[in-house]
Amino acid sequence: MRATWFGPYPELPTGYAQQSREWIDRLATAGWELSISCMAGRESHMSDWRSPSGHVIPCYPGTPYEKTGQDLVTANYRHWESELIISLNCSWIFNPEIFRQMRTIMITPVDIEGMSRKDYDVIVNSGATPAAVCRWGEAQMRGRGLDPLYLPHGINTAVFRPPANRKKTRQAKGVDGKFVVGINAMNHERDRKNYDVAFDAFAQFHAKHPDSVLFLHTQAILPEGLELPVMAQELGIFGACHWSDQHQLMTGAVTQEALADWYGTLDVLLMLGNEGFGLPTVEAQACGTPVIAGDWCTGPELAGDTGWLVQGQKRINNWHGKFWRTPVTTSAVAALEDAYEHAGERRKRAREAALAWDADRIWAEHWEPVFKELAG
């Protein structure tokens, strides 16, 4: 069966691209004849992508005239003589009229309680089949009367694994004997990731535990994001912050192996955003690092059995017409305090929990049966 994957070029350093990489490779191995219609990462010229298993996948480019690739996706679909298009992104960015012309599966992360009215409207008005990436998202979709497929995210647990020698790794980074808190979150927007509360909670914790440091795997300053160094300076924690190499981040040069090494250095990962899935949560756990997450969205599903859950307060998101959550700072500080005492006890359990999200297992249990049925 011929299909077009509509997503970012699989080598981009983003969660959507990483997931594209995992599932395109497995679909091709299962016999699907695939092309990629690129939302980002390829512009104005055709190219090929060689998957980890060696499949050569044609990549149709985007153009400089429409930043999400929607101006070419229908033509690409027809040129490839596709029978199905599989999109992976926030659905609210799409024009439903475009997808009404194609048989579409919209894999849609849901990061807002009740599901964004904009995601919902696009799915309904396009006639697409929705697919959820986690059970929480599936529940939000069903609460709106949708009947989604279940196509969860997964990770490569052979790459994301505990370091062979954690002490040596930490010594190499100059943090042996320190309590290392990490945040891995994009800085492309100002409020979804709740950086302000996370920084404030760490500042209060650091005042009591000066042996603590904050590792930040994010762009420090972006036009559409926050000036994180300024925030750190105002809270008095700038000297405790360790920033990932900014040039490597901006050029996409950070490998999965390097990211796994980064996770393995941490004592705990702090994830307090409103997440449609939250890949860093399972990546960190796969590396033996427990996670402090919110008690909303996917926090309980991904980290509830092995980490710590922070209380959240409802706040309206006017754009999406539903509720996000803001962490309660005192709850986040309390979680950091407990992690300071007990994080080491949870490393083995964190790894075991993450194995449930291994991409090979997710493929066999969820993706493969769906696509076997679609292929007839």
Image: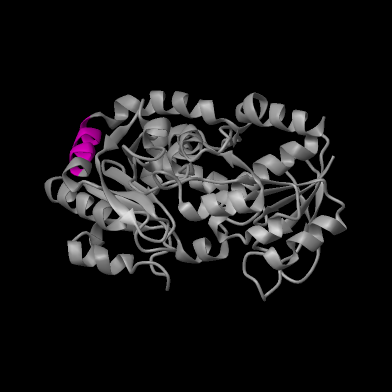
Count of marks, rendered view: 0
Residue furthest out toward the left: 208
Instruction: Tell me: 315 left or right of 100.
Output: left
Please tell me whether the stretch drawn in magenta is mainly helix, strand or loop.
helix
Q: Quadrant of residue 339?
A: top left
Q: Quadrant of residue 238?
A: bottom left
Residue nearer the viewer, 173 or 52: 52
Question: What scheme was used to colour the molecule?
Answer: one colour
Q: Position of residue 239 (x, y in %)?
A: 24, 61
Q: Quick one: quadrant of the N terminus? A: top right
Instruction: Tell me: 339 left or right of 142.
Output: left
Q: Position of residue 80 (x, y in %)?
A: 86, 54
Residue at position x 62%, y 62% from top?
Answer: 95
The magenta segment is 333-341
Residue 154 visible in image: no
Residue furthest out toward the bottom: 65
Instruction: Tell me: 321 left or right of 36.
Output: left
Q: Is residue 259 above or below residue 251?
A: above
Q: Position of residue 118 (x, y in %)?
A: 50, 56
Residue 75 visible in image: yes
Q: Position of residue 310 (x, y in %)?
A: 26, 39
Q: Quick one: quadrant of the C terminus? A: top right
Residue nearer the viewer, 220 or 128: 128
Q: Is residue 319 above or below residue 368?
A: below
Residue nearer the viewer, 141 or 195: 141
Magenta-colored stretch includes residue 81:
no
Q: Is residue 256 above or below residue 46?
A: above
Q: Is residue 29 above or below residue 100?
A: above
